[in-house]
């Protein structure tokens, strides 16, 4: 061995180990993202999101209605569970409507479009008849059904516009008439303005805004040209500005955006106390039933401002959970509308998604002080049977459409019962415990030999 310059033997260095390259599959974060992406792309994802999200929102809404309405009921000399029992009854009826709508074929949904529209218009006309219609909080949009039960026909007008508008645009698309602007607008826009006029006769601008959002959603899905879309939007905005300018109440609500104090004559009392409720909730809230603002400080605590009570009692965690559920519901509706090949399903699913997400954004934005108070309930969450029933029927529509996707139908058809029933393409299989017993007896007999 040759020596070094110092006369010492050279130092033997250990050979370098080859670098180990880890594939993305070995990364736990990458594996988690891959599994999440695969689960997100499954055929039944939209079905589970609509069903699970709507169910969780409704159940949590029932809990919060019971918590937020107890003080109001006691102040009215009613039992503490009065409003909860009415909401639970409406939720039970709405569940039946949801199940019926989820099992109805698409042809039957289209056949019901015109009867529902005619019924909604008839009821909205009856609201303006003296002796039949009644005013609640200054809005003439209610019909008394006897006792403590009332109905608001304008809520059913949303469902009517979605079904009828989707059927109308789908038929015109099948006949290739949507390339002409007159077929794009007529009779969709005049009928929508008829519904808006009947609603505005009662002074309910919040519901009119939701109906306008549904109209623009349908026009957008139908592929309306930008000039036509902007023209209709400008016309509707002009009417809205005129209606706001001519109403001192609406101007006062507009002035309460971002208010930090009640102002003169306490005109921003509700908006400010909604912020107080959210601010006092903290991260996890003061506890279910422990709200302070619902003790007469916050008006409409169980209806329009139930999101504020949720923030006070369940904290930021509770409000973010509600937002996540509505985001999942909106994504599922967009996915159903984007993956179908049936034009009616596309327009109806898009209309329902626009309706629910727009109403949720307007309600939550008003509670957060980002938008004027429009007086619209939080879908599936706030107290109110008139709003809950058509909304749950609309959720049933989304469930039916999600089940009707080709990939979802194939995934549901592949599901087979595990125990004691016939399997497709073969004789009935034995029960599992019988098979295990035969294997055990065979092993015992072979051992005895």
Image: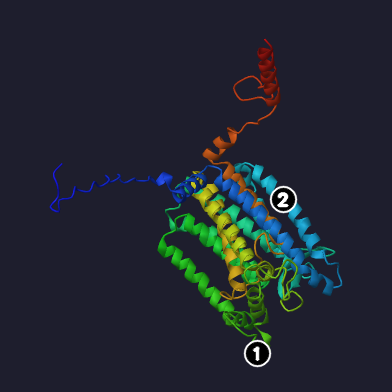
Q: Is residue 88 above or below residue 311?
A: above
Left or right of 202 on screen, residue 10:
left
Give the labeled residue for mark 1: 264
Left or right of 157 on screen, residue 175:
left
- Nearest the eye: 35 or 220: 35
Residue 355: x and y in percent read 58, 60
Specify whether residue 319 is in view: yes
Give the labeled residue for mark 2: 95
Residue 213: x and y in percent read 55, 64
Q: Is residue 183 above or below residue 433?
A: below
Name the colour scheme. rainbow
Secondary structure under badge 2? helix
Give neighbour class at mark 2: few <14, some 14-19, many 20+ (Cα, 10 Å): many
Distance between the alpha carbons at the discs numbered 2 and 1 = 45 Å
* CB within 8 Å, label 2 to label 1: no
On-image quarter of the C terminus? top right
Residue 72: x and y in percent read 79, 72
Q: Residue furthest bottom?
A: 264
Give neighbour class at mark 1: few <14, some 14-19, many 20+ (Cα, 10 Å): few
- In the image, what residue occupies the spot 65% across and 42% down? 104
């Amino acid at each position: 061995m040759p020596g070094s310059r110092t006369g010492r033997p050279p130092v033997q260095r250990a050979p370098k180990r080859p670098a180990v390259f880890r594939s993305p599959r070995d990364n736990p974060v990458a594996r988690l993202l891959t599994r999440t992406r695969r689960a997100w792309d499954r055929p039944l994802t939209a079905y589970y999101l609509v069903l699970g999200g709507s169910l969780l929102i409704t159940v949590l809404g029932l809990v919060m209605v019971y918590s937020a309405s107890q003080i109001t009921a006691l102040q009215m000399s009613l039992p503490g569970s009065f409003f909860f029992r009415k909401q639970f009854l409406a939720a039970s009826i709405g569940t039946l409507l949801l199940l019926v709508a989820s099992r109805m074929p698409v042809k039957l949904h289209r056949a019901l479009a015109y009867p529902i529209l005619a019924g909604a218009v008839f009821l909205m006309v009856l609201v303006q008849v003296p002796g039949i219609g009644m005013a609640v909080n200054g809005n003439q949009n209610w019909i008394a059904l006897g006792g403590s039960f009332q109905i608001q026909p304008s809520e059913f007008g949303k469902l009517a516009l979605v079904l009828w508008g989707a059927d109308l645009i789908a038929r015109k698309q099948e006949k290739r008439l949507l390339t002409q602007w007159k077929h794009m607008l007529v009779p969709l826009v005049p009928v929508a303005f008829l519904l808006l006029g009947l609603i505005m006769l009662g002074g309910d601008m919040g519901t009119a805004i939701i109906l306008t959002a549904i109209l623009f959603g349908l026009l957008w899905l139908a592929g309306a040209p930008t000039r036509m879309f902007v023209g209709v939007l400008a016309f509707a905005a002009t009417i809205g500005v005129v209606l706001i300018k001519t109403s001192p109440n609406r101007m006062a609500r507009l002035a309460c955006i971002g208010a930090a104090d009640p102002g003169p004559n306490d005109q921003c009392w509700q908006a400010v106390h909604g912020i107080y409720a959210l601010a006092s909730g903290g991260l996890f809230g003061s506890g279910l039933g422990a709200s302070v603002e619902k003790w007469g400080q916050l008006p409409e605590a169980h209806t329009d401002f139930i999101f504020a009570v949720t923030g006070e009692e369940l904290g930021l965690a509770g409000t973010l959970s509600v937002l996540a559920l509505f985001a999942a519901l909106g994504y599922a509706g967009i996915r159903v509308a984007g993956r179908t090949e049936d034009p009616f399903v596309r327009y109806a699913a898009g209309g329902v998604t626009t309706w629910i997400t727009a109403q949720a954004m307007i309600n939550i934005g008003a509670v957060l002080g980002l938008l004027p108070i429009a007086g619209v309930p939080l879908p599936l969450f706030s107290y109110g049977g008139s709003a809950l029933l058509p909304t749950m029927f609309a959720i049933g529509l989304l469930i039916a459409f999600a089940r009707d996707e080709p990939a979802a139908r194939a995934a549901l058809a592949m599901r087979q019962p595990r125990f004691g029933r016939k399997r497709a393409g073969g004789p009935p299989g034995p029960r599992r415990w019988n098979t295990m017993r035969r294997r055990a007896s065979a092993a015992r007999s072979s051992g005895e030999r």
